[in-house]
Image: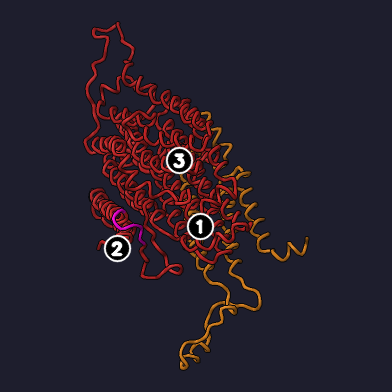
Chain colours: A red, B orange
Amino acid sequence: MATHFPALLIVIPLISALFVPVIGWWKKGLCYPLVVAVLVVPLISALGILNRVIESGPFSYYLGGWAPPWGIEYALDYLNGFVLVIITAISLIVSIYSKKSVEKEMPEKVVPFYTLFLLLVTGLLGIVVTGDLFNVFVFLEIASLSCYALMAIGRDGAPLATYRYIMMGTVGASFYLLGVGYLYIVTGSLNMANVSELLPSLYDSKVVLTAGIFMIVGIGLKMALYPLHAWAPNAYADAPSAVSGLVAPLMTKVAAYMMIRVMFTVFKPVFFIELTPVTTILTWLAAVAIILGSIYAIAQTDLKKMLCYSVVAQIGYIALGIGLANKSGLTGAVLHILNEAFTKGCVFLVAGAIVYKMGACNINEFKDLYRKMPFTMSAFLIGAFSMVGIPPTCGFFSKIYLIMGAITAEKWVFVVVLLFSSILNVIYFFRVIQIATFETPMPDYGRDKPYDPVYMDEVPLSMLIPIQVMAAGILLSGIFSSKIISTVIQFVIPVDF
Amino acid sequence: MLEYIISKYNFWVYVILLLIGLYAMVGKKNLVKKLIGMNIFQSAVILFYVSIGVKTGGATVPIFMGDAHAAHGHGRAIIDVASYINPLPHVLMLTAIVVSIATTGVALAVLILIFRRYKTLELDEIMKIRKDTGV
């Protein structure tokens, strides 16, 4: 059983996705418990994998018993194990949260929602677990296609935003596929480890350069890296709450994982750092993404849209950490993947809870919200703290490592950018907190009682508990960040850094 | 120059198709035309893959005729790799074709949603409607 964890991770959600419509056709209410129960299996598998990696080092699993480079290999190391645990944990939490939100926002689409939800999780896990370049493309498209369908269910502008996302996403995936094709021409292999061994003697070839650029641009599109981010804010903001709660924390982070894989595993770090100026370009794009994303976020009046631009800015942090390409920078980037998954998960679920209660999430209508929904809003407060980087939340530690990385690389501009972006984050997050906490609706003195009485009006427990778990995740991953780094993340860093 | 182009004509064909597709996706105002552009774009990638399986010197499709069985008695049949084209890129493209069809299907479904909402598929008209209604 334990030896087959890497296969179970993929197979269980994939097969269950086929059974959800059958069971939903018989009894609609059974879909939700089934999905929650199914998603426990990947979480256990991911924890088992990470445990095994920590105890006995990286290992690989041959799918169907076919040895690489001919068969598909699932290569498990510290980076995958870590990202797998994040994906499975977040998807389980969001699936628990989804019940009431789905019933309210799309009552007649419960069955398709849960089917696509499982397929999306399958795709995300597959991208991370596989050690085969073409297999990544297949899982990427499984994840993207189910993501398109889920997003199109959303509110008014959703279909058009989704259509734009389909166009951009397909171009991104096709570019990645072209890059894989070029690598296949020169190496004749699709296995990441094998390609990585064969490539160094070919680094001066133009074909390899083209392949690298195609792959990075394709992944950059999927990752919503500035200036390829245009599809993301609308698509994420208009999606149903439960969907944006799953997609915003995970989809772009998995693309960031792919970028780390391609840059530092498939290619050796030396290729993108010394032979081509890719990392330098990446850091500058990331710096622009951080500043512009934050400024756009300040300009929004819709909470979900604000958070979406925040996603663009936070992807900039991860890209900056990858682009700095030194020990502290990459540590910061990987830790920021964890931080972002919990923080964005938390704030998007809070936004979903507000939509559930108020029907919309216009920031200017948040007056007295803290008194109405104290537990939800305190989770939001923790999320905002993490986004700004206030200890002991995880955001503080990932930012510290990124700043240390920028100092080590002696690129002072990025130190300034990182610090300045914290101030911008304060502006757009604390504006929400200020309206929700300190502002009350205008009193009407013409009446007997000029103030409307405010009652506590919390969301149901099935929504509140996942939100609190996410908030706890932010705090715990901050408090134990040094332990996480010493047991997992320090082994992610390539040896030649 | 001309010889250079002709000797690598498969790459030129794929690049031109890729750019036609990209132009349609960016330049056309009609959403269905954009979708057709996306299909051309994906077909270009598929043709690129199919063309890289080719080997010069009379290589053919990897179908074993009688001689493989005839050689069975002497132990393992000797398969001359140079006389068969590389089938792997073609097999990969079967998957990519399925992906492309699925993407087209999802995109068409989304187009139906858009049409139901705006009663048009011209992007500039949709933008005008969105502006007028303030969404």
Determine the CA span between mark 1 and mark 2.
Answer: 31 Å
Q: Do callouts 1 and 2 point to residues on the same chain?
A: no
Amino acid type at image mark 1: Ser
Measuring from the top left, give residue A238's x and y in whole percent. 42, 37
Residue B115 shows in this picture: no
Q: Are marks 1 and 3 on the same chain?
A: no
The amino acid sitting under disc 2 is His
Residue A465 image point, x, y percent: 23, 37
Q: Which residue is mark 3?
A: A329
Residue found at the far bottom of this picture: B73
Q: Are marks 2 and 3 in contact (CB under 8 Å)?
A: no
A444 in relation to B62, above or below = above
In the drawing, what numbered circle is on residue B100? 1
Where are the magenta residues, as a range?
Answer: A54-59
What amino acid type is highlighted by mark number 3?
Answer: Gly
Crowdedness of circle 1 by 10 Å Cα count: few (<14), some, many (20+)? Answer: many
What number is the disc on residue A4?
2
Q: Is residue B45 left or right of residue A495?
A: right
The reply to whether residue A159 is in sight is yes
